Amino acid sequence: MAPRQLVTYPNPVLRARARDVAEVDAWVRGLAGEMLRIMREEDGVGLAAPQVGESVRMFVTAAQEDESAPERVYINPVIVSFEGALEASEEGCLSLPGIRGTIRRPPRIAVRATGLDGEAFTLLSSGLLARCWQHEIDHLDGILIIDRMSAIDRLASRKPLRQLESAAAER
């Protein structure tokens, strides 16, 4: 099987609600390894399975620079709580190269998921990691940053989005 590659907009897998992972098996572990590899190669902070063409509820995150969190795999993640007033911050997305926009998200969240060992875990975080979790869970629901941007940022993104659409049509 050929190595997986990063999927970019407007690939339809990015707009589909991903299905639950039934069990942590060799296929899931292999997918996790490929996702971690691609995330590292692309210098990402997170990557969802739809971004590598697999419509399953799974994402990975990079180790945090401050060493507060290791590289991790999240299977069937769910946000279980959030705290604080929405905060605006600029986000980009590996599947939307060249597009950035201001996104408003809760600053502190708790997420529950299953790890590669098959064990459930719950984590609480704020800052970049909390924002990353929300961004990746959006991917699992078929939601992209362009759906959460302000009208001004969406307008500014029209030309790069058309370029991505044209490039996809030529393939």
Image: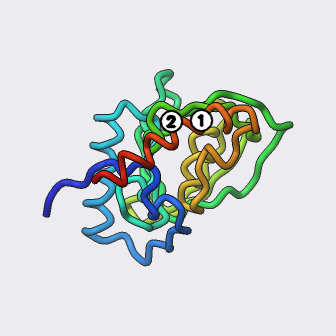
Residue 136 vertical position relative to residue 159 in the rendered view, above or below? below
The residue at the far right in this view is: 85
SS under mark 2: helix
Name the residue nearer the viewer: 165 or 107: 165
SS under mark 1: loop
Residue depicted at x 46% and y 63%: 12
* Tag 1: amino acid: Ser
Mark carried by residue 4? none
- Return the x and y of residue 168 as percentages of the image width and height: 36, 51
Residue that mark 1 sits on: 157
* Tag 2: amino acid: Pro
**Marks 2 and 1, how far apart in space?**
6 Å
Residue 1 vertical position relative to residue 104 in the rendered view, above or below? below
- Occupied quadrant, residue 122: bottom right
- Occupied quadrant, residue 164: top left
Residue depicted at x 25% and y 60%: 30
In the rendered view, how is the structure colored?
rainbow
- Occupied quadrant, residue 50: bottom left
Horizontal side of residue 77 vs 24, given as left or right: right
- Return the x and y of residue 86 as percentages of the image width and height: 81, 37
Characterize the local packing of mark 1: few (<14), some (14-19) or many (20 or more) Cα atoms within 10 angstroms. some
Mark carried by residue 160? 2
| Badge 2 vs badge 1, beta-carbon distance below 8 Å | yes
